[in-house]
Image (spheres, rainbow, N blue to C red):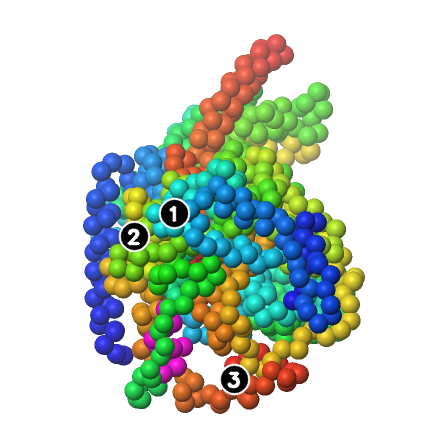
Amino acid sequence: MTMLGDRQQLSYIASQAADARLNLELETEGMTLNIGPQHPATHGTLRIIARLDGEQVVWAEPACGYMHRGYEKLAEVRTFPQVTTLVNRIDWLGSFANEVPFILAAEKLMGIEVPTRAQYIRTILFELSRIANVSLFLGDLGVQLGAITPVFLAFRDREYVLNLIESATGGRFHPNFDRIGGLKDDLPAGWIDETRAVMKKLRSFCDQIEDLLFGNEIFQSRTRGIGVIPRDVALQYGLSGANLRASGVDWDLRRDQSLPMMWNKADWKVWTHPDGDSFARCWIRLQETRESTKIVDQLLGSIPAGPVMAKVPKIIKVPEGEAWVSTENPLGEMGYYVVSRGDLGPFRVKIRSASFNNISITPWLLRGVYVPDIVTILASLYFILGDIDR
Amino acid sequence: MIALLAEVPYWGQSLLRVLGGLVAVLLPAGTIVYVFLFKMMSFMQSRLGPMEAGPYGSMQLFAEVGKWLQKEDIVPERADARIFKMAPVIVLLSTFLLVVVVPFGPDAWFTDFATGVFYALAVSSVSVLGILIAGWSSANKYSLLGGLRAAGQLIAYELPMVLAVIGVVIQAGTMNLQKIVVAQNSGSMFGVDAVGHPYVISQFVGFVIFMIAIQAELTQAPFDMPIAESELVSGYMTEYSGFRFLIFFIGEFATAGVFAMIASVLFLGGWGVPFSWFGWTSIDSIDNWMNVVGPLIMFTKMMLLAFIIMWIRFSYPRLREDQLQRFAWKGLIPVALVNIAVTSVLKVAF
Amino acid sequence: MVLNLPSEKVKPLSSTSETATLVVDTAREELLATIKNSLGEAVVDSHLKPGDDLWILVRTDAWQASLKKLRDVHSFDYFCFLSAIDWMPSPYGRGEDDPTEPAPERDTTIRPGYAGGETRIQVFVRVVNSTTHIGLNVKVDVDDTTPVIDSLISVYAGANWHEREAHEMFGIDFAGHSDLRNMYLPVDFEGHPLRKDFPLLARMVKPWPGIVDVEPLPGGDSSDATNDGDAS
């Protein structure tokens, strides 16, 4: 194509050789096993290099970057509204939730107040994306441990949520619906009643999964006491979301900070668990899915009438400043540090993604576990590759 | 029937036996795959399963067999080629050797060993060899892990299987499988002979242990560590594709069928119905039509037990290797030993 | 600007209808005073946005010690992230240059952001107090000629991966970090992509389609009522 093609190819071969040298160097004892990058267990192209002694891990190290798309560099050449298309694809299962913190940061810098109706709908869509994301986690949890049936139930019930998101935003996976100042469109007719029906279905799905998977003795013996993360280690590594709450830290960004979103208008509970093991993480996510359905139900009943878009100029220029907004995304704490220079687009965007921190604990956590437990621990930490690699 | 068969020359009888053996192994395998793997699993998972090939997807198995047969025969470069190619055959071979002792009717049997049970248990462990050498010769770390896990697991669960069967042998007083069937169907429980004396009731503990041990011998969930798909891709079968994978696949379900047959012989009364229904007194007084109906009854009982095996497979997550071993050595074997002791005491007392 | 106010310590001052409502953030002001007290000379500058956030700029040689104090004395035990900012405006602009025309002259003077700073590249870290839920952004200057700074691994174990990423993206060396391998990029990648003078390779390979394809932006009057939110 251009000169870059040949150079890229040579560098690729050279890096392959460098990696091989690294592998050879490490082959001193035991067996070095590459789990991934293509593997049924990892949620994407994550490569874990594990040195095994029999069935026990001596050390394990994730090698990321197979999906690095350079979003922070790309965001610098985009205008502010265009960044949402990029950012949708970081955590692609709960994609609306990725747009929200960025839009909130831009609105904070511009000083725009979003109409209440838009805030309600944003919160509802945010919680729907959380439900879509975590219900896949619950199904996938079974597959990682060998139970092949729950994942089909999960996909079946997740389809309802995706259909809802599609009817409101036009996109199942990448809605690209949030705009600076509000939302792109209003809700279609009949959406509210449909959502209520879907939330009922999802509550019964949660009950089914609890029966089928969480009550199972084998599941319990595979997850209890596996991968225990003490509270101070979790805080040091910056674990967030259900992983942090499973270690006993009572911290939920929806409750503990004030953003122009409507979580405080609903009555819901923050779940924590003292154990810090894999079972705790999985269990908390199950309970949080139920809470999300409750939040959606309550908010649906009180959406005010009004516009969904504030008065915003046609060309958006965000005034100079720096802003940090983070929200309680399905995977954890996701935040954007937006630096603006009064230009059409951001000067620098630092994307703080939850899975990057969540997976950074694995070298510490995976020492001395068995090979099957690697899969259990990764499944319970729950990451999306796009979130790690951005 | 005997009169008919007596006129067939010896080579004809052998040919019939070979064909019968093939049918006895492949027909259950195919039926189990279609009914349970394609359809029952799909319905349990809220989907329909294959529907395109044939009415309600009944020809799907033939389509799959055809697909696998026409694939390229790949042997990894660093694999030990000869052993690599032998491994699937050994696994399937043990299934054929096993079905040889199963009686299908009063006169419809392949062999009538006096020590049929002993032979069956011995031969069923030949498949372990096949799995081990498949894992080792594949030159693949995942296969190696799978093969090692399989070796440990299969050897560990041989013991509960053997010990559970000893209770049946003590109760029947013989190791001949045909005589065990007759003993169950001509016996009576608490003086009532309308149901015969199926050992599933009097040897219930043994039955449960045997079914769990079979689940492990077949490397089905919750004991499918050797094939743990989410960790080891396919375990010892990772490097096998095409025809060789087909043999592993058939072997897996054929062995499930044959083990279910053996379990139904040992515990459910095999090909027979209680003799009191038709007023038979001994095996010689059974009517000839039983040789046709017997295999059907055996087939039904086999499907029932295979249903249980598959149902558990689709529902449970898998046990970790050390939990699996602990369960066998610290759980099943002591219970089986106690079962033997109690059975022998009760047999002598009554 | 009206935000939902976080805690009862923040109270709005009364004001006339012409000026914006002034917000007083007592919690953060007290926190800033305490930090300045205990860190003393190490704090070069600070910036407080009431009701929003708090930034401090720390002296380069006191980087590790300050964060250690923040963790131990002020209970900032949650490590959110570590990254860097390159304050030089990009000489490539927004990547929309027509390759057939000569590159326009661009202003590349370095202007730092909140809490000041003197160097082109700054490392910044965000730490949060897990009980009061108040966060703190700590910035530090990194020397332009020899970009070396102390590693925070001994203070926050989670800084490991973040420093690796900052190293490969900005070229900052972290003294004391034993394993500064590349995080995302291949082993022998040359250059530091997030620096502003490293061009966006995608735009070098294929020019911005907007040069020929796209119609120009509509007239940019901020008094327009409607907004379509898209650039084209």
Tell which tag, 3 or 1, sits nearer the viewer: 1
Span colored in magenta: C88-97
Residue A347 point in image, percent of width and height: 44, 69
Q: What count of labels does the image hold?
A: 3
Q: Quadrant of residue C145?
A: bottom left
Residue occupied by mark 3? C232
Find out whether the residues at labels 2 and 3 contact each other: C-beta distance under 8 Å. Answer: no
Which chain is home to disc 2? C
Q: Is any atom of residue A364 visible in this view? A: yes
The quarter of the rendered structure image containing the N terminus of chain C is bottom right
What secondary structure is found at the residue carrying circle 3? loop
- Answer left or right for A302 relative to A214: right
| Residue located 30% across and 63% down the image | C192
Residue occupied by mark 1? C63
Residue C148 is labelled as 2
Q: Is any atom of residue B281 visible in this view? A: no
- Answer left or right for A238 relative to B187: left
| Residue located 34% across and 65% down the image | C195
Residue A301 in magenta stretch: no
* Dot placed on the residue nearer the N-terminal end, 3 or 1: 1
| Residue located 46% across and 24% down the image | B329
Task: State how far apart marks 2 and 3 are (Cα).
Answer: 43 Å
Q: Assess disc 1: are there few (<14), some (14-19) or many (≥20) residues with their C-alpha within 10 Å of its C-alpha.
A: many
- Answer left or right for B126 relative to A340: left
